[in-house]
Image (cartoon, coloured by chain):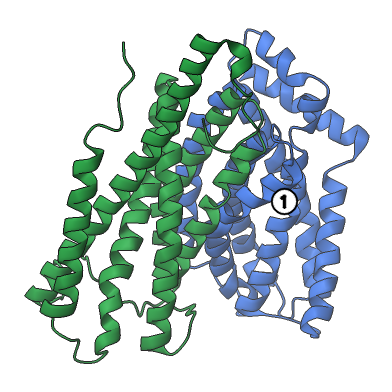
Chain colours: A green, B blue
Amino acid sequence: MAPPSYSRGLRGLSLLTVGVITLALALVFFYAPLDANQGFIQKIFYLHVPLAIVSLCGFVLGGILAAIFLRTGDRRWDMRSYCAIHMSLILSVGGLVTGSIWAKASWGHWWVWQEPTLVSYLIVILLFATYQPLRFSIEDPERQARYAAVFACTAAVFVPMNFAMVRLATAYVHPRVLNLEGGNLPGPMKLTFYISLLGIALLFATLMKFEMTAKEARMQTRRLRRSLLGDDAVTPLKRSAAPV
Amino acid sequence: MRTALVILRKDLRLELRSLETVPAMVMFSVIVFVMFHFGLNTITVKGQEAAGIFTATLLIAALLGINRLFVAEREQGGFDAFLLAPVDRTALFVAKATALYLYLTLLEVIAVPAFKLFLLGPSLGGSLPGVIAVLALANLGIVAIGTLVSAIAIQTRARDLIGPLIGLPLQIPSLIGTARALGPLFAGHPASAPPGKWVAVLALYDVVFALLAYAVFDFLLED
């Protein structure tokens, strides 16, 4: 059976991502009204909040994929879980930086401890930042995959738990965008926000797919070299945090 | 269950003869109290500040025990022997978690009076039962996460590094709950009870992570 090809549909997905992000940016700058209190700086919200939401969902997704790996023992799920967490980490740093800029602009400080969403976000990032060092410090690839998956499951459960705890602990000043009543955004802003969210989610999907494609291609190349040129033609894998 | 008891007895006997873990944790926590005294340049602390100092010290002292929890198994082939035996793997988790719980309790039996002696201003009198209840709950969370983290870290190359690195962020919710529940108890009001909200939150954290650790622990032993 041929391995699943991650490259299928990658071009279409990339084009769609470019299209949606372009549309989102156009909406942000030309359609969404200026915020009455914060003015132009409020527009960073259309980047910051989607980055934060998508990266947190990506972390949880990584945990779910890791749980599937633990259940099935199929190393491909470990690779998917790794890619999801890797990409989420990158997006989450973006989310933290944009959040900090927004905090400076609207509250006057780069860092605001009274802000539970920001603080719990930081804790989650600190936790997931240990994912790669953990992987790197286990040499046996099979054990590395298993231990990383156990960690990813635990950390994924930790995400909602941590948000609940930190929110309880502080009086919040963050504007609630996605609450059960559908938020308090006016229509044009809401539309812009959802398009931006979709754009960032597609960006995440594209990048993750791209990473999985690259890893798959690398694996296939090694397999082909080995079968055509013999074992000597393949350089042994270096110690690595990545599954492949 | 019987397997867990056997392993627990082995661990406790080992600890009793070598005295490696608990005395180290106790001395460490006392040293940290002294450090806080000089660092804060204060004679006494109270309220939320005292609760924060105490809880942070407790967590960091617990790390010492967590780091050493599986060392004997790793270095003297206990893992292999355990895997060869026809017993339930979860027994190892239960035994290690119980041992860590006992270590933490012993640590607190000494650390709480030491804290009162060195740093805490208000008298503990009436709130002592509350403190004991909160610490009993807090230990449960530290133990659930700690045993899991210890089992992960023991197989890595830099285990002294990886353990705290993974463990401390995971313990932050537990730190929040414990510190906030202890705050009013260290404030010096006579016979105050711990705030119900934080006790409930702490209990929820304990239950979630105890179940989770119990569920995923087996995967760490498959070799």
Find numbered disc 1 in the image and state the secondary structure of the residue it sits on: helix
Give amino acid for label 1: Ala
Residue at image x 28%, y 74%? A45
Q: Is residue B213 left or right of residue A209?
A: right
Residue A83 appears at what percent x and percent y?
42, 41
- Position of B89 with respect to A23 (left or right) is right
**Pointer 1: residues within 10 angstroms few (<14), some, or many (20+)?**
many
Query: Which x, y percent locates residue A65?
Result: 38, 34
Between A56 and B149, the one lying in front of the other is: A56
Residue lying at 62% horizontally and 61% vertically, measured from the top left? B129
Residue A35 picture location, percent across and down: 20, 86
Counting every numbered tag in the picture gives 1
Quadrant location of residue A120?
bottom left
Chain of the residue under the numbered disc 1 shown in the image: B
Residue A52 shown left or right of residue A165 in the figure: left
Q: Residue furthest front?
A: A229
Q: Please name the residue shown 15% across and 69% down the image.
A: A192
Pinpoint residue A174: horizontal percent, then vertical percent: 33, 77
- Residue A43 lies in what quarter of the image? bottom left
In this orientation, does residue B187 appear?
Answer: no
**Residue A87 seen in the current view:** yes
User: Toward the viewer: A86 or B212?
Assistant: A86
Q: Is residue A18 above or below residue B45?
A: above
Q: Is residue B129 above or below residue B34?
A: above
Q: Which residue is mark 1?
A: B62
Q: Is residue B212 above or below residue A47?
A: above
Q: Quadrant of residue A132?
A: top right
